[in-house]
Amino acid sequence: MTAITESTILVVDDSAPKRYLLSNWLSRAGFAVSQAETGHEALAQIEARDFDMVVLDVKLPDMSGLEVCRRIKADERTATIPVVHVSAHAVDVTDRTIGLVGGADAYLAEPIDPQELVATVQAVLRYYRALRKAEHLAAGLAQLARTTLAVTTANGFGELLTHAAAGAARLFGGTAVVAADVLDGTWSAVRVDDTGRTDRRDWTPPADDAPIGFRCQSGHADHWRLPAGWLDDQPLTVASARLRDDLPPLYLFVAQIPDEDSTQLLTQLTQALGAAAEAQRAQDLDHRIAVTLQRSLLPRSLPALPGVELAMRYEPASTEAEIGGDFYELSLLDDRLLIAIGDVVGHSLHAATVMAEIRHALRAYAVEGHPPGAIVQLVDELMVRLLPVEMATLCVISIDAATGRARLANAGHLPPLLITDGQASELWQRAPLLGIGHPRPADLEFTLPPGSTLLLYTDGLIEHRGTSIRDGIATLHQLARHVDADLDAFCDRLLDRLTTPPNADDVAVVAVRRM
C-alpha cells in the first residue's frame, strides 16, 4: 500500500498566492501536489486521474467548494477521496458544521498554520488508509468464502480447477492459474484472466519437491513451464499446498502479491484448494474402484447363437455422480437365450454390491431351468429374506432362437421395445418391484418375428431432468423405430442422441435381433 508521504493531493483555490503556499507546505512534507483554480477544473482533474486527497477552498469563482465536495462524495468512483476544506471567510462554527455535514473530512479556518495543515492531512489519510485496508480485507475474505464454497461443492476436477482459478483471479484482481494432478500422474492447469476468460491445458510440473503443508515463493512462468501467454513477462507468486508426502501438491500462480494481507488470503485460499482437491481425488478414486468392481460383475462377452445378433452398451455414471446398480445378463442355456436387465434402487457402492448378489442368484436359478416368472419370484423371495431393506427392478426374457417364441417376466422395470417393420411397441407387464413380496402375474408370451429387434434399457437412457419418463420413452420410440443394419451402430446412435456425458446415472442397453 502507498505510504502517506507518497500520496497525491489536489489543491483547489482561486488565489494563486494561497495555492502556492498550500502546495509548497505539502510538497515540503513529502506529498505530490497538483493544483486547480476552479471547481470545474478540479472535477475534471479528479475525473481524469486518481488523487488520495483534495484540499478545497470553500469559496471558488464558479461554484461553491461545498458543491464540489458534494459531487465528489456523490460519485461512487470518488466517494472515498477525503476532502479537507480551507477558508478565510466561512470560519465560524456554523460554517464549519455545514462543511463537515456536507461531506468534508476536516475544516481549517485561515490563518492556517503549516504544521497544523500537514498534521491534519496526515491524520485524515491515516484514517482512510486504515478504512480502505479493512474494506479490502473484508472483500477479500468474502471472496475467499465464495471460492472455498465453490471448490468444495464442485462436480469433478475440471470444475474444481476452474472455480479455483476464477476465484483467485477475482480475489487478486488479475490472471490466475491453478494446476493439480487430476489422477494417475496426469496434470491439468486452468487459467482464468481478469475478464473471466478460461483456458485449460495439460501441464507438466518442473522437478520441484513441494514441502508438506503450504509454501509461498517467487517465480517466473518459464521456470514453471506455464504455456506461452500465461502470466509471461512478470514476477509471480507461486503457492503450493500438499497434505501428505505420498500426495501430489496443488499449485496456484498469480502476479506477485503486494502486501502481507494478500499473502494471508493466498495462504488460506491455497490451503482450502489443497483440501478440496484431495477430497475430489479420493472421490474419483473410489468411483474408479466401484466402476471396476461393477464391470467385473457384468458379462465379459456376448454368447454366440445362430440366427440371433446381439449388441450391448454399458456406460457408468460420471465421476461426478455416485455409482449405480444397473446390470444386465446375456446367457445361452441349451437352445434358449436368457436376457435380463435390472436396476437396484439407490446409487452407491452398496447398490453395486446388491446388484452383484441379485445377478448371481438370477444366473443360478436360470441354470436350474426355471422359466422367467419363476426366476423373478425366487429372486424376490431371496431379497425379502436376505436383503429386506433393498428393492430393485428386473426384466427377464427367455427366447427360443429357432421359433422366436419368447416369455417375459417384469418386476417394475421399464418396458422393452419390440421393433418390427419400422414400428416400435412396448411389452408391458405390470408387476411389483423385487423386494416387495407381492403376488406376480403369469409370464407374458410373445413372438420375435424374423428381422425384428428387441430393445432393453435402463432409466439412465431415457430419464433426464425436466422431462417425464413417458416423454423419454416416446422419444426412444421415435429414434428406435428404424434399426441400423449394424446393431452396434444402432446402440451407439441411441446413446449419442439420448445421453449427454457426463452421465448422471448408469446406462445399460441390450439389443437382440432375430435374423
Image (cartoon, grey):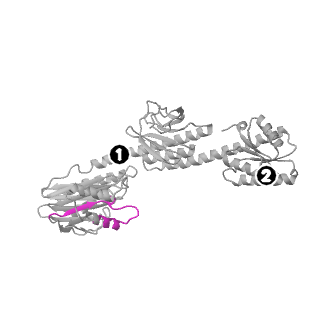
Vertically, is 432 above or below 146?
A: below
Confirm whether the magenta stretch covers residue 453: yes
Per the image, the residue denoted by label 2 is: 65
Tell me: 461 left or right of 55.
left
Foreground pick, 66 / 343:
66
Q: In the image, which disc is placed on residue 197?
A: none
- Seen at 52% across and 40% down, the residue is 271
Tell me: 459 left or right of 200.
left
Residue at disc 1, secondary structure: helix
Q: In the image, residue 259 lies at what x, y percent?
A: 62, 37
Q: In the image, which disc is placed on residue 288?
A: 1
Q: In the image, residue 451 lies at what x, y percent?
A: 16, 63
Between marks 2 and 1, how big is the CA–CA gap? 71 Å
Q: Amino acid at mark 2?
A: Gly
Which image quarter is the N terminus in?
Answer: top right
- Seen at 70% across and 49% down, the residue is 44
Foreground pick, 99 / 11:
11
Residue at disc 2, secondary structure: helix
Neighbourhood count class around disc 1 (C-alpha, 10 Å): few under 14, some 14–19, many 20 upward? some
Confirm whether the magenta stretch covers residue 376: no
- Seen at 24% across and 58% down, the residue is 490
Foreground pick, 363 / 94:
94
The magenta region covers 450-477
The nearer-to-camera label among 2 and 1 is 2
Neighbourhood count class around disc 2 (C-alpha, 10 Å): few under 14, some 14–19, many 20 upward? many
The quadrant where residue 465 appears: bottom left
Q: In the image, residue 304 lies at what x, y percent?
A: 15, 53
